[in-house]
């Protein structure tokens, strides 16, 4: 080993970009999860830094706010010894109407190998990926996809259940606005899990049945056979009209508390991508239940994002490997 990166799984992703889970094969998802296992070992040891991305430059470009994704990507890049730039959109020339492409081309001219971007427009990453040499990583695009969130969710499920194949996963809540739900639907189905969507008809569009999903509008019924209950945040900021009468009524029908959780299997896990509207989607008591893996999801995000950076090429080709 020349770089201290002693993970047993290696390999490469074909594409230079990570745009969404719709584009990844089962083997590619497994490759990321297997490599993340190795990185999880690395980040728990005393010396957490490896030189795998030494000489590479990673730019965080967030047009929407973030705590988990932005911080864990920054930490992931630093743990891999990359140089990290946190681009501040609010004080940049974006405020002088510089276009997205001009902004990214400028960043690339300064040497960026990876651009991690969150943007309100669905498809912004696909467009940029075709225009620039840097690896574009989707950290959330509109209501479309949030692939690394789904990867860390699947990692957490696999860690607790051993495998994703054949599991019943129930995704609950604001499916309509959720890029996390879309990525998880693609990823979980590809990995052989069965997905059921639960929520009010206004937030769970019937068209999704065409993707081979079950839809249920009753929470107690929907979670009865689930191995994993995946609660979503109500995204009030994306709602231009009232899609349910009140948060109080939503909580009454779809908020997960101890009573409703008692209808699920005794070993069913509870996940949520965060941030949680506590006592709306999930009660504080359920958050404190050992079956609730919200904190583990955050922790696992670091290892999964290290694996993604490692497996993508970046602008100047693949990162240094353990045996190169
Ligand atoms: N789950 C998630 O994307 O959280 P942040 O918005 O805090 O990054």
Image (spheres, rainbow, N blue to C red):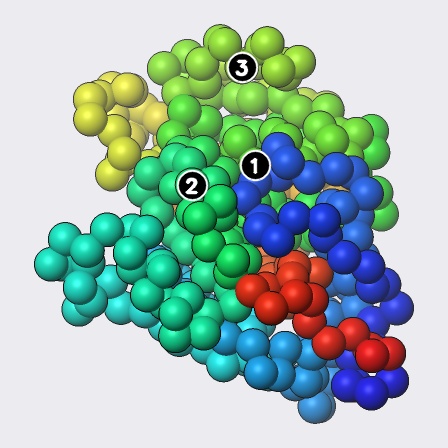
Going from N to C along the chain, the mark reached first, 3 or 1, is 1
Marks 3 and 1 sit apart, C-alpha to C-alpha, by 13 Å
Marks 3, 2: nearer the viewer: 2
For the point 41% across and 55% down, the residue is 117
Residue underneath mark 2: 127
Residue underneath mark 1: 183
Quadrant of residue 197 within the rendered picture: top right
Residue underneath mark 3: 208
Q: Are marks 3 and 2 in contact (CB under 8 Å)?
A: no
Give neighbour class at mark 3: few <14, some 14-19, many 20+ (Cα, 10 Å): some
Tell me the quarter of the image containing the C terminus. bottom right
Q: Up-down: is 219 above or below 137?
A: above
Going from N to C along the chain, the mark reached first, 1 or 2, is 2
Quadrant of residue 12 within the rendered picture: bottom right
Quadrant of residue 313 within the rendered picture: bottom right
The residue positioned farthest toward the left in the image shown: 96
């Amino acid at each position: 080993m020349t770089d201290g990166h002693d993970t047993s799984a290696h390999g490469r992703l074909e594409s230079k970009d990570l745009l969404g889970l719709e584009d990844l094969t089962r083997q590619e998802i497994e490759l990321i999860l297997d490599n993340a296992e190795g990185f999880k070992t690395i980040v728990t040891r005393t010396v957490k830094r490896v030189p795998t991305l030494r000489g590479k430059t990673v730019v965080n470009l967030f047009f929407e706010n973030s705590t988990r994704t932005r911080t864990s990507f920054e930490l992931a890049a630093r743990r891999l010894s990359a140089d990290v730039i946190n681009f501040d959109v609010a004080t940049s020339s974006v405020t002088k109407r510089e276009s997205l492409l001009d902004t990214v081309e400028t960043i690339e001219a300064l040497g960026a190998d990876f651009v991690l971007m969150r943007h309100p427009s669905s498809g912004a990453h696909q467009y940029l990926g075709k225009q620039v040499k840097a690896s574009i990583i989707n950290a959330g695009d509109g209501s479309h996809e949030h692939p690394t969130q789904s990867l860390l969710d699947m990692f957490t499920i696999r860690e607790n259940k051993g495998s994703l194949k054949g599991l019943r996963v129930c995704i609950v809540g604001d499916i309509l606005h959720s890029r996390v739900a879309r990525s998880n639907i693609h990823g979980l189905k590809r990995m052989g899990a069965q997905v059921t969507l639960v929520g009010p008809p206004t937030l769970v569009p019937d068209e999704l049945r065409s993707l081979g999903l079950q839809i249920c509008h009753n929470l107690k019924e929907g979670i009865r056979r689930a191995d994993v209950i995946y609660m979503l945040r109500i995204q009030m900021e994306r709602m231009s009209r009232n899609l349910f009468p009140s948060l109080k009524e939503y909580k009454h029908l779809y908020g997960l508390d101890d009573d409703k959780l008692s209808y699920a299997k005794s070993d069913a896990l509870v996940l949520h991508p965060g941030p949680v509207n506590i006592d709306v989607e999930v009660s504080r008591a359920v958050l404190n239940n050992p079956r609730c893996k919200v904190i583990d999801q955050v922790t696992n995000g670091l290892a999964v994002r290290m694996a993604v950076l490692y497996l993508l090429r970046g602008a100047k080709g693949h990162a240094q490997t353990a045996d190169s």
